[in-house]
Amino acid sequence: MASTICLLPEKHFLCFLCRDIFTSPVTIPCGHSFCLSCLSKYWTRHQSKYCPHCRRLFTDKPDLSVNHILADVSENYRKSRPQKPPDEETVIDVNQMIQERVQKIERLKYSLGLQKNSYLREVRESQKIFSALVNAMEKSHKAVVASIEERQKEEESRVETLVKEIEQEIEELRKETTEPDPQISGDQSDDVKRPAKPCEMKDWSKVTIETDPCIGVTRRALSDVLEQIKLEVNRLSKAELKRIEKYSVDVNLSAKTAHPFLWVSDDRKQVRHTDKLQEVPENPKRFDRVGNVLAKESFAGGRCYWEVEVGEKIEWTLGVARQSVNRKGKFTVCPANGFWTLSLKAGGQYIANTSPVTQLALDQRPKKFGVFLDYNEGRVSFYCADSGVHIQTFTDKFTDRLHPFFSPGRMHGGRNGAPLVICSSFCSI
């Protein structure tokens, strides 16, 4: 059988990506085959699920498994492949390099086209949204002006009425001073009608007009506009999170970095505080003062997203940390020390661990948080995974590899005994 296999052209046993004989080959729906690790890295790097060979795009993630027949045949070919003369190998390598670069040019042009469409779509969307907001602000401003003018007219009418009443009383008072007193003239009868006495007139000292009636009018109108903007921001945030989910990565806890008080599950997806020292070996990468743990995975580029379930816990910290952070002794968790994190304190206050800390006002208490790292853009963003609402974004310049960071918080008498659970749905290849 080995001799028969050797009669086949070598191209049938070569991975399109690494140009070497297949290792754990997988075959995708379009019929092309690749090494499992090569395809995994390719799809992770390009953030899309299409065939590297024919460019066919798959709407749903293909269900991949090793093609055992192709794997066995490739392994037999590996053992019996004929040795090629050095000159021939050199020519093939050069041709492969040329072909790879031609394909790279095609992929770059294709990606540029997709990028251009994305730019245009974002411009159109932003124009639509900002135009709507400008119209809403103009409408609100017109309503404020109309309300003020209406109120001004009402006050003018009121003052005009008051002035007439006062002028009428002035006239009556003048008559009081010019007409003779009927008691002085004996010829006049006692029932002669007289003007109102001064003591019977209105007390004008209590009648006032407010000279600054518009306090808070513009602020209230602007608050209504800001509420509308907030609703629009939340809508955009939800749509944004949907787009971010395609960058989901598999995150697993690194037990060798966990503080001895922390329990890490066998599947490396859960961590909780125990208030009891675990029997763990000494490790220079292990946190020794605070109950922290890092993920095994680290990132030095691209975009990554994962979710963490916090449930009803009353204290925790989530985010990312530099690979080179201090893990021994006392330190402050802040960006200057290589930590970009969000926390819930035992008193119920959410904070961003800046220096000084930034208090966060959340409309609801999320049970699941999403963490999005855009390494190249220098951003770490936090979302409420339940509602899609954006919570906080750190902006910095990253120069070191970054690990997902977790701290489940102290037990607090058992009230905080539940674990943090990594629950991201990711594309398993």
Image: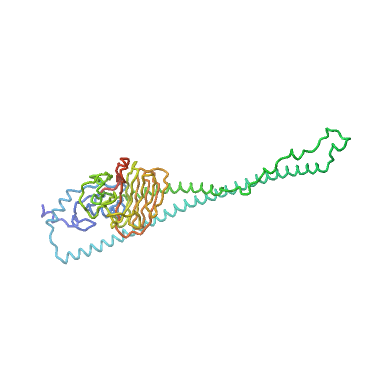
Q: Nearer the viewer, residue 140 or 242?
A: 140
Name the residue at 40% across, 52% down. 358
Looking at the image, can residue 56 be seen?
A: no
Residue 364, given in percent of the width and then of the height, sits at 41, 43
Coordinates of residue 248 in the picture (x, y in percent): 31, 49
Relative side of 317 to 268, left or right? right
- Residue closest to the eye, 422 or 95: 422
Quarter of the rendering containing residue 79:
bottom left
- In this image, 69 relative to 194: left or right? left
Q: Determine the residue located farthest toward the front in the rendered image.
A: 184
- Give the answer, above or below, for where 322 lies relative to 147: below
Q: How is colour applied across the structure in the image? A: rainbow
Task: Where is residue 233? Give x, y as percent.
Answer: 44, 49
- 56 or 316, nearer to the observer: 316
In the displayed structure, 59 sits above or below 9; it is: above
Q: Is residue 375 visible?
A: yes
Q: Position of residue 160 (x, y in %)?
A: 70, 45
Count of marks, rendered view? 0
Q: Residue at x 21, y 58 (%)?
A: 19
